[in-house]
Amino acid sequence: MMQSILWEEELRGGQTWSYVLKRGTALRLTDVDGGANVSALFYNADFPEERYNMPDTLKAQHIARLTEGFVLYSDMGHILCSITSDSVGWHDPIGGTLNAAIVHAKYGDKDYQRHRNEWTQSSRESLLLELAKYSLGPRDLTPTVNFFSKVQVDADGSMHYVPGNSKPGSQVELRAEMNVLVLLSANHHPMEPGAVYAPKSIHLAVGQAAPVAADDACRVSRPENGRGFTLTERYFGSEARA
């Protein structure tokens, strides 16, 4: 859990954000009005070739959703972030990212030159622009985590978006286990059925996290996570506290 807040800011609907979350700090996302979606990307800030790996995250923890007690694995077996607190219970790791084709089909093609603040944006293109600030591009895109959204999968493999998953004031908190480059896009989930372009705002808070203890809930939730924490600590030449 976050011990102290270093700074806070508002991420308005449609905006994109990025920040290097230092190891040992935490990021809290708050859905201000309810019904928000935040598409997120994660990279090792010191070595961006290492990045979030959705398949390993899901199969290592035997899950198809993310919530408190789970972690985000990199493609090298390290743990990028842990979900240390969550009042929602379900965040979507499989639904994909809002792209330009979906935006144009559902909300219309409204550019900034003609429509100003009423323009329609896609998360994919916004995240690509943000990635360019770090000399990263399309080949560096990975599946996003869609915080505050829920997608269920039936036995036949069909996927269904579940409306109303996040209430006003819902929060999720991430603890950085490495120096992590985090990119966020506060925009609609690609499967959200509404036809009105009105992405919701998110409140962000960055603060100092408590040290990771040997009995940390994320560490002990699965044997695989224990090994992931050990591998990550060895990457930094440290050991868990007893």
Image (spheres, rainbow, N blue to C red):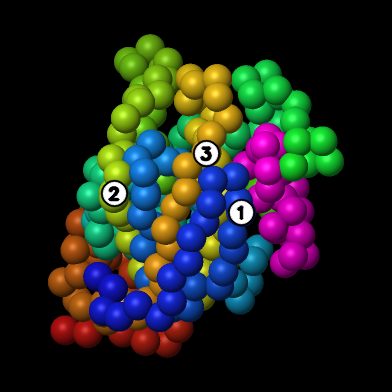
State which quarter of the image contains the N terminus: bottom left
Residue 16 circle label = 1
Amino acid on which disc 1 is placed: Thr
Query: Closest to the observer: 215 or 111?
Result: 111
Disc on the earlier residue, 2 or 1: 1
Q: Position of residue 58 (x, y in %)?
A: 38, 43
Point out which mark residue 170 bears. Answer: 2
SS class of the residue under badge 2?
A: strand
Across and down, in percent, residue 230 comes to 33, 73
Circles 2 and 1: CB atoms closer than 8 Å: no
216, above or below 224, in the image: below
Nearer-N-terminus badge (1/3): 1
Mark 2 Cα shell of 10 Å, populated few (<14), some (14-19), many (≥20): many
Over which residues does the magenta segment extend?
117-138
Q: How many marks?
A: 3
Observer-nearest of 239 and 160: 160
Q: Which mark is residue 199?
A: 3
Q: In this view of the protein, can residue 26 be seen by the observer?
A: yes
Q: Is residue 21 left or right of residue 154?
A: right
